[in-house]
Amino acid sequence: MTVLAMDTSAKAASVCLAEEDKIIGEFFINTGLTHSQTLMPMAEQLCKNAGVPLDNIDAVAVNAGPGSFTGVRIGVAAAKGLAFAHDLPCVAVSTLESMAYNMLGCDGVVCALMDARCGQVYNALFRVTGNRIERLCDDRAIALSELQKELQGCTERVVFVGDGAAISFKSAADLPACVRLAPMNKVNQTAASVALAAFERLKAGDTCTPAELMPVYLRLPQAQRELNKRMGVQP
């Protein structure tokens, strides 16, 4: 089974072609260009270079959120379009869950982090044991100070992963000595990890149609929050 996986949930963008037992190829770019400029050209060039026509792909996987509102929409829209055009199933992957797959083989707790602004982070915790991922909490938007309190009692190794990992690691005070920042080559969410997470969902039959694939947001967009505030609407 061959999967085309995509991630546009933050500043970086990536696409990956993968089979269950190997990564065929991956393109990753972190230049600040808009994802609408980079995503589809990367996908087309990757398939061309790998000699894998889109008609030979079995499923399209994407980080469906949380993340940048615009970025997530672009990735989901691209996945929907490709899947619809080629009559393929879609696999919606949690951005935070995909980050845990960066650390396969590195036993410990993965603290997946994205900067949600306003003193909050998008976060979830996972335990990695060999090649097994165990979710420890739901995806959530949480104040960094609250997350710091949760981690105070940790004694096993905790690794911060994600585009919000570095700023969270630097901003949080008095973290336990067991907390570490993932190395540069593992810290960002990538399409290869989306593919790994997608294969687990495919084994469980957890797919959806292009029409059913939707972005997953943990908060309202900033513009909507500001409008609600002006109108006195309670969150």
Image (spheres, rainbow, N blue to C red):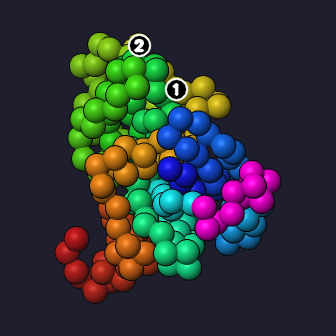
Residue 82 coordinates in the image, percent (x, y):
57, 73
User: Which residue is depicted at the point 28% across and 49% down?
Assistant: 204
Cα separation between marks 1 and 2? 11 Å
Which image quarter holds the C terminus?
bottom left
Residue 11 coordinates in the image, percent (x, y):
62, 55
User: Which residue is depicted at the point 37% across and 44% down?
Assistant: 200
Does 156 appear in magenta? no
User: Which residue is depicted at the point 54% across and 27% down?
Assistant: 182
Residue 176 coordinates in the image, percent (x, y):
36, 17
Residue at which label 2 appears: 177
| Relative vertical location of residue 188 with respect to residue 49 in this rendering, above or below | above
Q: Is residue 42 visible?
A: no
Does 47 appear in magenta? yes
Label number found at residue 181: 1
Q: Main secondary structure of the magenta part?
A: helix
- Residues rendered magenta in the picture: 46-56
| Relative vertical location of residue 137 with respect to residue 230 in this rendering, above or below | above
| Relative vertical location of residue 14 with respect to residue 209 in this rendering, above or below | above
Label number found at residue 144: none
Q: 62 or 204, which lies in front?
A: 204
Under mark 2, the amino acid is Ala
**How many numbered marks have been drawn onto this rendered protein structure?**
2
Q: 221 or 91, which lies in front?
A: 91
Q: 44 or 54, which lies in front?
A: 54
Q: 172 or 16, which lies in front?
A: 16
User: Which residue is depicted at the point 65% across and 31% down?
Assistant: 185
- Give the secondary structure at mark 2: loop
Residue 133 coordinates in the image, percent (x, y):
34, 32
Q: Which residue is farthest left?
A: 234
| Relative vertical location of residue 188 with respect to residue 59 in this rendering, above or below | above
